[in-house]
Image: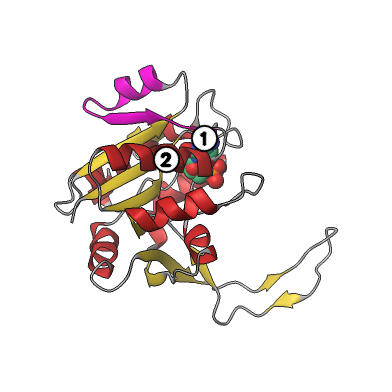
Amino acid sequence: RRVVAILVAAGSGSRIGGGMPKQFLSVAGRPMLAHAHAALTRHPGVTDTVVVVAQGEEERLLHTLREVRWTHGGATRRESVARGLDAAAELGATHVLVHDAARPFLPKAVIDRLLASFDQTDAASPALPVADTLAAAPDGKLGATVPRAGLVRIQTPQAFRLSVLRDAHAAWPASEEATDDAQMVRRLGVSVAVVQGDAVLEKITHPADIAAAEARVGAEYR
Ligand code: C5P
């Protein structure tokens, strides 16, 4: 097995402010994307890591990470993953882990669980149960409650046999967006195993998320 990690970091991160893409903002003492990059590259089961970076950001990337393999991203997350898949194929990958740079704190145990899943399945994603009550809120007023039993919140990294995820990207309609890759392979009828996620994997989207994430993590991430 040759596992290549694809770290997608080509978003504009415009919701967070700060004058640069959020994946370069400092979190727990390091640029956001440096955390997950370190977790992936030091895992013995990950052969290579490719960072997908926006046009014009390569200098900032090379300044941030001393040694890094990278490729250019596209206009959407889906396109950025597709570019990462091309790079992974060139590196001889049989399997990939696709991870959002916006989720900096990546426990080794989650990577272990994903790699172990390859013995049984071609696709797996970490997820956590939903604790809050969920409801629609169409016009600022609560609508129907959505039963939360059996629902999960999906995280990354998501793990795939390379050929399966490439087929899913090739088959996906260009006009349609996808917020993760698991939904794309499911469309082809591939079942996606759930492995236990982790609270520290939460995605950073808004400015307040940085302080909240820093408060959640222990010394191993600082
Ligand atoms: O915007 P959002 O937080 O959903 O993005 C999830 C991840 O996808 C981020 O790490 C972001 O950098 C990445 N992304 C990308 N290329 C895009 C849009 C998002 O690599 N065009």
CB of mark 1 near ligand 1 (< 8 Å): yes
Image coordinates for residue 92, horizontal then vertical, percent: 22, 43
Quarter assignment of residue 12: top right
**What's the residue at 51%, 47% (across, down)?**
209
SS at mark 1 in the image: loop
Residue type at numbered disc 2: Val
Return the residue nearer the eye: 81 or 101.
Answer: 81
Circle 2/circle 1 CB separation < 8 Å: yes
SS at mark 2 in the image: strand
Return the residue nearer the eye: 210 or 181.
Answer: 181
**What's the residue at 14%, 52% (across, down)?**
44
The residue under label 2 is 8
Is residue 193 located in the magenta-colored stretch of the structure? no
User: Residue lying farthest left?
Assistant: 44
Quadrant assignment for the N terminus? bottom left
Q: Is residue 30 left or right of residue 207?
A: left
The residue under label 1 is 11
Q: Which residues are magenta?
A: 58-74
Return the residue nearer the eye: 4 or 56.
Answer: 4
Image coordinates for residue 108, horizontal then vertical, percent: 24, 57
